[in-house]
Amino acid sequence: MYHQITKLKQNCLVYVKQLQNIKRSIFASFFCLPTSLLALIFFLLLLYNGFAVFYVHPPFPSKPQPEPANFSKANLARNSLKKLPSSVMYAVKEDTPSVILKTLLPLLQNPAISMTPINRSVVLKPKKAHGYKAVKRMLRSGDNSKQFSTRIRDFLGNRGCKVRFFMTWISSLKPFGDRELFAIESLFKSHPYACLVIVSNSMDAESGSLVLKPFLDKGFKLIAIKPDFDYIFKDTHAEKWFKGLKKGNVSPGEVSLGQNMSNLLRLALLYKFGGIYMDTDVIVLKTLTKLRNAIGAQSIDLENGNWSRLNNAVLIFDKNHPLLFKFIEEFALTFDGNKWGHNGPYLVSRVVSRVNRTPGFDFTVLPPSAFYPVNWSRVKSLFKGPEGKAHSTWLRKKLEQIKSESFAVHLWNRQSRKIKAESGSIINHIMLDCCVFCNSSSSTL
């Protein structure tokens, strides 16, 4: 009996030992199994993450389920305030900001590329390429301008011009409206025997001739001629600058190339031919023939009475005047197509401040009342009719002051183009005094 118990005990020990071995194997497998699974799961996550990063979702939004219409006031008010998607909001960009900043944002490492956030479906294009398209259009439109020198010399030489006026219109014919036509009316009302040259591609066409025909029918002397830039800029610093522009070595910048070309053209035309340049938003009040080699101040320093800024909307200079030469030189050497006014009003201000009182530069700086009796920030007051006894008195005194002290009035087109002249306003009275076609003058001036 004892022997059987001993044998059974031995068998139990063997069985327990086998169970321990099995348990040890199971635990070993159990501890190995999660590590393998973890490695496999980690590998699969890496694959999924890489796939998610490089996968491009097609821009097809899922079709939303229709919702029942809700026309309650609360719902309408809430819906009216919903914001557009950011990709759409960033794509909207105004061409003409209401306020012109005097400072620029810092340049990026590659300023030729537009970094404005837009929809992904819109392809980013270099600004430089866009600017040079404008250069090509301008040069292409002037291909038929090689008769410029002959036509302008014949016009100025054979018409018995007592005074020469120049205007530039570097734009399409469509914006040339009532205001521009009235500027021409006022010019001939004060100078019936003057000659007017309008340097323009769009005006030197059949449609442009129809616009100017009423003046020609009245016997006034005017002509529109396509510019020959090579001829006009020849033998000045502008010649080299213009060649660089054509070759792509000069960036036209973000400011309208037409605006900057007009800034340069007026200087070169007066330097080559002499006379009076006027912007197309300047209304002439009285004869300018007694003025010679003059430029007008836009503003003055109230503390010392000296001018603080000049303007180039009206320029009166003899042929080959040294100040014009300096203006053109400054344009060519310091041209910046990204700063508004840098190549225009600020340019003439810079040069005059340097050469002032230098021997050989005989010219006059006229006070703001001569051409700019109202600052651009207050030009709307010229178009307002009387709004009471006090305002009526102010309008009458201001009109008398302008008639007494001013040769012309600059209307600051950027700020006043869309304003209508109200009955009884200062502009309304000026129109009645300076019109040629008085029955057809428009109140939209």
Image (spheres, rainbow, N blue to C red):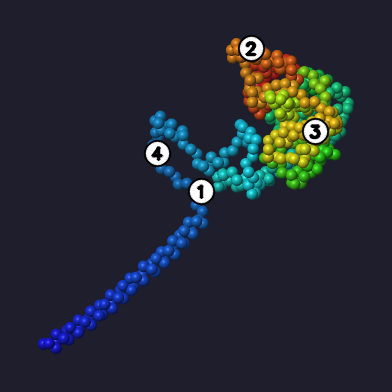
- Which mark lies nearer to you, 3 or 2? 3
Residue that mark 1 sits on: 59
Query: Is the residue marked by circle 4 packed among few (<14), some (14-19), or many (20+) residues within 10 Å?
Result: few
User: Within the image, what quadrant is residue 266 found in?
Assistant: top right
Tell me the kind of residue under disc 4: Glu
Residue under label 3, please give it. Answer: 355
Q: CA distance from mark 3 to mark 4?
A: 74 Å
Q: Is residue 147 above or below residue 442?
A: below
Residue at horizontal 72 percent and vertical 33 percent from the top:
346
Query: Residue flagged by tag 1: what amino acid is it?
Result: Pro
What is the CA distance from the residue labelled 2 to the residue labelled 4?
A: 62 Å
Mark 2 or 4: in front is 2
Q: Earlier in the sequence, mark 3 or mark 1?
A: 1
Q: Earlier in the sequence, mark 4 or mark 1?
A: 1
Q: Which mark is residue 393?
A: 2
Circle nearer the N terminus (3, 4): 4
Q: Position of residue 360 (x, y in %)?
A: 86, 31
**One can see residue 271 in this view:** no
First-in-chain label (3 vs 2): 3
